[in-house]
């Protein structure tokens, strides 16, 4: 079946999981997860694949090996279109609603080094500034993990020091679970935002990728 939206039960499932993040809760409601969360996400990403590429759905289980928080399950369902290693488009649903994003998520040392070199160079750094400024002006949040201080080798007065601090860089938009989320309009919202992220993702693929080819 085609994508018809995320049912209200998807958000109810995650509200319950946030209150009781246990194997007992998840096992008892696994069919609800499969029908109200996973199946619509698969349908959505399948329909988007022709334009943006295939997406990978993340598993619902958390990796708790190195975490103090031993909650076994993620309180959201995400999917990622991996256009380059660690660079791509993301969509997620949770009790908070729908979230979309696009950008650079990995922190491999060689990728971060290439990213900063490109930001430092005016020929490539100024276009990135224009892209992120345009996204912010359109209401998107420009986010990512960043250093609290300047990276080594750069001065505090660099015209793009805020971008140089980033170890990852992405833009995102969060939508509350309004009635349209339960309809096919949700696909249009994802398409609209992913297209808006296109210039950022293209810049990152060009300057951060290294020698890898696009994944489509």
Image: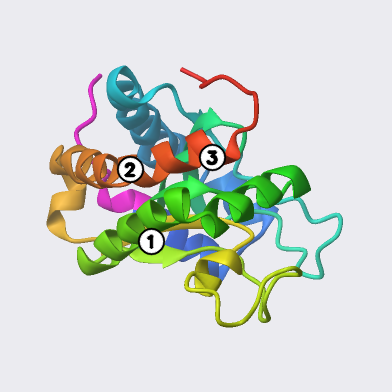
What residue sits right under mark 2 in the picture? 199
**Mark positioned earlier in the residue sequence (2 or 1):** 1
Q: Percent position (x, y) of residue 93?
A: 39, 51
Query: Residue at 79% of width from left, 56% of height from top?
Result: 64
For this view, does 66 lie left or right of residue 98? Answer: right
Task: Give SS at disc 3.
Answer: helix
User: Which corner quadrant of the image does residue 12 belong to?
Assistant: bottom left
Query: Residue at 16% of width from left, 39% of height from top?
Result: 188
Question: Over which residues does the magenta segment extend?
Answer: 1-10
For this view, does 41 lie left or right of residue 145? Answer: left
Task: Give SS at disc 2.
Answer: helix
What colouring style does the render use?
A: rainbow
Distance Cα–Cα, label 1 vs label 3? 14 Å
Q: Percent position (x, y) of residue 152?
A: 76, 70
Q: Which mark is residue 207?
A: 3
Distance Cα–Cα, label 3 vs label 2? 12 Å
| Label 3: few (<14), some (14–19) or many (≥20) C-alpha neighbours in 10 Å | some
| Label 1: few (<14), some (14–19) or many (≥20) C-alpha neighbours in 10 Å | some
Q: Percent position (x, y) of residue 157?
A: 55, 82
Does the rendering let one see residue 58?
yes
What residue sits right under mark 1 in the picture? 129
Query: Residue at 67% of width from left, 59% of height from top?
Result: 22
- The answer to the question of whether label 2 and label 1 lie on touching residues, with beta carbons closer than 8 A, is no
Task: Give SS at disc 1.
Answer: helix
Q: Is residue 24 above or below residue 70?
A: above
Distance Cα–Cα, label 2 vs label 1? 11 Å
Q: Nearer the viewer, mark 2 or mark 1?
A: 1
User: Which corner quadrant of the image does residue 177 belong to?
Assistant: bottom left
Query: Residue at 25% of width from left, 19% of height from top?
Result: 1
| Label 2: few (<14), some (14–19) or many (≥20) C-alpha neighbours in 10 Å | some
């Amino acid at each position: 079946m085609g994508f018809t939206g995320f049912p209200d039960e998807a958000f109810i499932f995650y509200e319950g999981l946030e209150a009781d993040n246990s194997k007992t809760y998840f096992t008892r409601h696994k069919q609800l997860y499969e029908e109200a969360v996973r199946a619509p996400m698969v349908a959505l990403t399948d329909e988007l694949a022709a334009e943006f590429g295939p997406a990978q759905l993340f598993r619902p289980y958390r990796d708790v090996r190195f975490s103090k928080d031993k909650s076994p399950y993620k309180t959201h369902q995400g999917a990622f279109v991996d256009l380059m290693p660690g660079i791509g488009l993301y969509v997620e649903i949770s009790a908070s609603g729908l979230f979309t994003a696009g950008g650079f998520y990995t922190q491999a040392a060689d990728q971060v080094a290439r990213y900063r070199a490109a930001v430092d160079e005016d020929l490539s750094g100024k276009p990135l500034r224009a892209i992120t400024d345009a996204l912010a002006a359109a209401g998107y949040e420009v986010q990512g993990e960043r250093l609290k201080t300047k990276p080594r080798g750069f001065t505090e007065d660099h015209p793009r020091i805020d971008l140089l601090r980033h170890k990852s860089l992405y833009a995102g938009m969060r939508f509350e679970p309004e009635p349209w989320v339960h309809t096919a309009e949700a696909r249009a919202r994802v398409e609209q935002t992913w297209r808006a992220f296109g210039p950022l993702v293209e810049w990152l693929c060009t300057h951060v990728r290294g020698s890898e080819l696009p994944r489509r």
